[in-house]
Image (cartoon, rainbow, N blue to C red):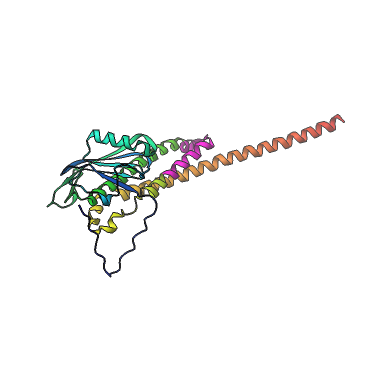
């Protein structure tokens, strides 16, 4: 399938953001004229090195007959359209050496897609994604939304765990006026907050429209419907708000730990001064 580039005109248009660094996504065709397929988005690690992946090319170079395709996103997600279990396991095995910081338990998002040439492109009441045709642009758009959704799901889970760890400390601080917490634990919590914020905002770029829409503005409506169905913006905002709460709490706990260490240091200095004074008095008393 040849992808047609839009004809340029003299009318002013918004400037496309520059593409930098390694390609964020590569793909491969699985073949077969599928008109209906299951889709699985699998978050396998913090990152996937998309360079030198045998059999994968830039999505624009792909040709598909139907819904059989696979996409690998640099921020750690594999999205498969119509792949059987054996194919999925084979792909995961091929990617194994390219996964950076693999997850012990992968996060998975499931969906189903169907091609209906005369239907309105939408997500129906059962969550079924309807497409007019199975062109690579539409598949990539669906894959991007699912990939972002599964990244958000992972972060939602991790942030909930962080809340569970911090809650007893806040309760202890409220009831007893202090929270026994080692400095290393506080720094770990702060590090997780910063990592989650970087992943959502920087890697998956959840708050930004896919680059694909710059070349295919006719897909804006489909993207808006997919984004609304998976609540990408709303979930990202909730995560951002929770990250701020966790960050503020972690900062407060860190200040408490630092104040506690400062008090101990002051007490140690006072004790040393008192010991020196006592030693001086004792020496004079002996004389």
Given residues 129 and 144, the one toward you in this image is 144
Which residue extends farthest right? 287
Q: Does residue 218 lie above or below 267 as drawn?
A: below
Q: Does residue 183 lie above or below 121 as drawn?
A: above
Q: Does residue 113 lie above or below 93 as drawn?
A: below
**Res 222 seen here:** yes
Magenta stretch secondary structure, dominant: helix
Task: Check if residue 251 falls in the magenta segment.
Answer: no
Q: For this view, does 254 lie left or right of residue 270? A: left
Residue 6, image x, y percentages: 24, 61
Q: Does residue 207 lie above or below 253 as drawn?
A: below
Which residue extends farthest left? 118
Which residue extends farthest bottom? 10
Given residues 211 and 270, the one toward you in this image is 211
Task: Check if residue 188 falls in the magenta segment.
Answer: yes
Q: Quadrant of residue 277?
A: top right
Q: For this view, does 131 lie left or right of residue 150? A: left
**Res 173 seen here:** no
Residue 80, image x, y percentages: 25, 41
Given residues 145 and 268, the one toward you in this image is 145
For the C terminus, the image quarter is: top right
Q: How many numbered marks are there?
A: 0
Q: Quadrant of residue 160?
A: top left
Task: Tell me the magenta residue range.
Answer: 169-195
Residue 107, image x, y percentages: 32, 37
Residue 92, image x, y percentages: 31, 36
Q: For this view, does 201 lie left or right of residue 224? A: right
Q: Residue at x 43, y 44 (%)?
A: 195
């Amino acid at each position: 399938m040849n992808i047609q580039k839009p004809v340029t005109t003299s009318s002013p248009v918004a400037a496309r953001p520059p593409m930098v660094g390694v390609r964020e996504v590569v793909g491969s065709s699985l073949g077969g004229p599928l008109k209906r397929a299951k889709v699985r988005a699998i978050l396998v690690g913090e990152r996937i090195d998309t360079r030198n992946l045998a059999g994968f090319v830039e999505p624009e170079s792909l040709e598909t007959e139907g819904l059989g395709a696979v996409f690998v996103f640099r921020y750690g997600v594999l999205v498969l359209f119509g792949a059987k279990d054996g194919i999925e396991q084979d792909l995961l095995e091929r990617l194994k050496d390219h996964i950076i910081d693999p997850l012990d338990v992968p996060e998975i998002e499931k969906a189903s897609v169907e091609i209906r040439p005369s239907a309105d492109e939408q997500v129906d009441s059962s969550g079924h994604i309807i497409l007019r045709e199975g062109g690579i642009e539409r598949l990539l758009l669906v894959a991007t939304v699912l990939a972002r959704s599964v990244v958000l799901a992972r972060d939602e889970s991790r942030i909930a765990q962080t809340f569970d760890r911090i809650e007893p400390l806040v309760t202890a601080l409220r009831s007893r006026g202090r929270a026994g917490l080692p400095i290393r634990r506080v720094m770990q919590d702060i590090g997780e907050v910063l990592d989650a914020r970087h992943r959502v905002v920087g890697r998956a770029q959840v708050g930004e429209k896919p680059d694909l829409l710059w070349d295919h503005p006719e897909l804006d409506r489909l993207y808006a419907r997919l984004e609304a169905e998976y609540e990408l913006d709303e979930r990202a905002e909730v995560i951002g708000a929770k990250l701020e709460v966790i960050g503020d709490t972690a900062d407060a706990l860190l200040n408490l730990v630092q104040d506690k260490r400062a008090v101990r240091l002051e007490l140690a200095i006072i004790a040393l001064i008192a010991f020196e004074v006592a030693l001086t008095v004792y020496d004079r008393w002996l004389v």
